[in-house]
């Protein structure tokens, strides 16, 4: 009785607005439907899904998503890790740096994107002006307008906003490593690099694995930043799945097709999530549960 | 923290060793240079925005990066005097606070049950909630739009508050459950012996004791709501209900080409509440992210 009363509100809200939409998406994806309440629906079976496989924009969205993920994992996270290691050392003004580096995380993606639209703009932009004296003025003007570079610019803005979050996670994990462990390694004759590679890095493993998970899931559902910064352009060069979904649903009124795209996003996230939990996080989660039970 | 899981315990304390002075003095300047360089990358775009807001558009075109000459406050005062900025501030605040109250309220009840009651199907139910973490919000947005429209809640703040709260449930339940578990069972037993009852214990003992955890999840929910964009974008098309990110995006959409300086001023003003909140709630925010995230 008490159980029901305590769980029910959360359960109702969750089933109604998280689970039901998922079921409705599956239903809608089987129809041709403009999205208007009274508009006719025509049953299509799996046509929306086969159509997706032939849609060049969708296929390229997958590729662009992959590029963003690869850049994040190869550049953003390692840079954040390196910085966390630096900031872990005694350094005057460390607290100020920490607060400053994390600050962009609290700004919304919209705020960040609007700011960087101006920063990257050709005529009044910060980037163009700063690079000008180095003879790169021309490069300064193409950040958001040149299809070859726009995805990289997008990645830079994402990194500007989020690297502080990862740095903070790594830093917190680093500070949980007892001093004795790294000092013992030093006493045994290990250099700083060896100590990092053989002692610190393995102990940071669980946090690094979780940060990779967050970064990938974040990239899969990326929307706000792209919508405001580039709208997916020029010529789809920075478009991602969620943008295509929004465009098909609310601009072209292909609600059924857009639902199929949304399910593709879901399946990608779910497949990645389950495989990652199964093969990468499993050990950590077992540890986490025992720790959660016993700590504090 | 999951990091603790792999930490070997009982390692012998290392003998103190004199640090090498030379290495330290060499390392520190380099550290400072790197930190300052990254600090500049973070700060310069924001400073560019603040200064740009003090220029008129002519100045911004001829002198994008220098100091304003003369300083011109009209961009800022125009926005502050217009009323729509304040209205968006109020809407964002009301949505963030109501939504947070809702999600924390319902999640606390559920987390109490998951932490304290034993019944069949408990773990299955908890897993259902936990899996919700893997549902990207973008996936639910189309059916949520249809449902909200069917309930006649378009252009109604509830249309944003309810789905947002529902999607916040998984993380909130997970964090609160692990905190509730740490409160000793003896406290509950004695409270019940004193005639408190389940509700009395929950309301008068458990919640007050869990203030730090409640603060953490509330701060996370507020920041999430404050920065959310996709949901308000599709639910609100009446300017009366624009939230701050939506208002900013609409402002730059119409004013970008003829009033870039005004757009910069708008960006800067919209950063102020977020940064002020960060200044106040920094500890809860970072603590919540570092513990909540590695647990989730």
Image (cartoon, coloured by chain):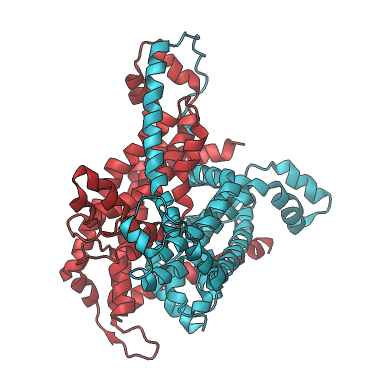
Judge by depth and name the residue closer to the eye, A110 or B268: B268
Judge by depth and name the residue closer to the eye, A25 or A81: A81
Judge by depth and name the residue closer to the eye, A218 or A131: A131
User: Residue A202: horizontal and vertical position, in percent?
Assistant: 37, 29
Q: Which chain is red?
A: A
Q: Which residue reaches farthest right? A: B194
User: Residue B122: horizontal and vertical position, in percent?
Assistant: 55, 55
Judge by depth and name the residue closer to the eye, A270 or B35: B35
Q: Residue at x 30, y 44 (%)?
A: A73
Residue A20 seen from this side: no
Q: Residue at x 21, y 43 (%)?
A: A134
User: Residue B54: horizontal and vertical position, in percent?
Assistant: 45, 58
Query: Height in image: A62 above or below B30?
Result: below
The N terminus of chain A: image quadrant: bottom right
Please give left or right for residue B41 compared with residue B155 in the image. Answer: left
Residue A172 seen from this side: yes
Q: Which chain is cyan?
A: B
Q: Residue at x 38, y 74 (%)?
A: B254
């Amino acid at each position: 009785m008490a159980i029901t009363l305590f769980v029910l509100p959360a359960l109702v809200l969750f089933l109604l607005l998280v689970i039901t939409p998922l079921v409705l998406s599956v239903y809608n994806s089987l129809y041709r439907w403009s999205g208007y309440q009274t508009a006719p629906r025509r049953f299509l079976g799996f046509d929306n899904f086969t159509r997706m496989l032939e849609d060049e924009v969708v296929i390229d969205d997958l590729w662009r998503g992959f590029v963003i993920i690869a850049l994040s994992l190869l550049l953003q996270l390692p840079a954040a890790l390196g910085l966390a290691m630096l900031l872990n050392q005694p350094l005057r003004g460390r607290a100020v740096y920490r607060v400053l580096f994390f600050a962009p995380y609290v700004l919304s993606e919209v705020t960040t994107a609007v700011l960087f639209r101006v920063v990257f703009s050709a005529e009044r932009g910060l980037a163009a002006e700063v690079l000008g004296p180095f003879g790169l003025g021309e490069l300064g003007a193409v950040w958001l307008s040149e299809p070859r570079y726009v995805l990289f610019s997008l990645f830079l803005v994402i990194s500007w906003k989020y690297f502080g979050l990862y740095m903070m996670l790594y830093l917190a994990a680093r500070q949980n490593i007892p001093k004795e462990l790294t000092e013992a390694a030093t006493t045994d004759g290990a250099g700083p690099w060896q100590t990092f590679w053989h002692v610190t890095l393995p102990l940071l493993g669980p946090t690094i694995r979780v940060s990779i998970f967050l970064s990938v899931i974040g990239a899969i559902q990326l929307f706000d930043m792209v919508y405001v910064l580039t709208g997916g352009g020029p010529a789809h060069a920075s478009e991602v799945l969620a943008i295509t979904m929004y465009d098909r649903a609310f601009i072209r009124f292909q609600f059924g097709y857009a639902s199929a795209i949304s399910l593709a996003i879901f399946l990608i996230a779910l497949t990645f999530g389950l495989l990652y939990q199964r093969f990468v996080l499993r050990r950590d989660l077992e540890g986490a549960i025992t720790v959660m039970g016993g700590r504090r | 923290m999951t990091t603790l899981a792999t930490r070997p315990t009982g390692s012998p304390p290392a003998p103190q060793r004199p640090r090498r002075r030379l290495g330290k003095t060499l390392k520190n300047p380099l550290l400072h240079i790197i930190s300052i360089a990254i600090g500049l990358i973070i700060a310069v775009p924001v400073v560019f925005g603040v200064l740009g807001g003090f220029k008129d558009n002519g100045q911004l075109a001829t002198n994008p990066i220098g100091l304003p000459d003369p300083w011109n406050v009209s961009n800022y005062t125009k926005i502050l005097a217009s009323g729509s900025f304040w209205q968006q501030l109020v809407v964002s605040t009301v949505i963030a606070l109501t939504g947070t109250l809702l999600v924390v309220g319902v999640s606390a009840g559920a987390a109490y049950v998951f932490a304290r009651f034993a019944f069949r199907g408990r773990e299955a139910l908890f897993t259902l909630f936990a899996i919700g973490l893997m549902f990207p919000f973008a996936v639910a947005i189309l059916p949520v739009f249809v449902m909200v429209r069917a309930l006649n809640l378009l252009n109604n703040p509830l249309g944003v508050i309810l789905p947002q709260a529902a999607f916040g449930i998984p993380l909130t339940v997970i964090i609160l459950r692990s905190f509730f578990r740490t409160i000793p069972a003896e406290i509950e037993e004695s409270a019940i012996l004193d005639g408190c009852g389940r509700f009395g214990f929950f309301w008068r003992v458990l919640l007050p004791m869990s203030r730090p955890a409640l603060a953490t999840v509330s701060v996370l929910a507020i920041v999430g709501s404050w920065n959310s964009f996709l949901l308000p974008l599709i639910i609100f098309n009446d300017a009366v209900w624009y939230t701050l990110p939506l208002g900013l995006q609409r402002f730059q959409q119409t004013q970008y080409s003829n009033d870039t300086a005004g757009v910069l001023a708008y960006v800067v003003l919209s950063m102020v509440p977020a940064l002020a909140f960060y200044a106040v709630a920094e500890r809860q925010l970072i603590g919540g992210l570092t513990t909540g995230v590695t647990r989730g």
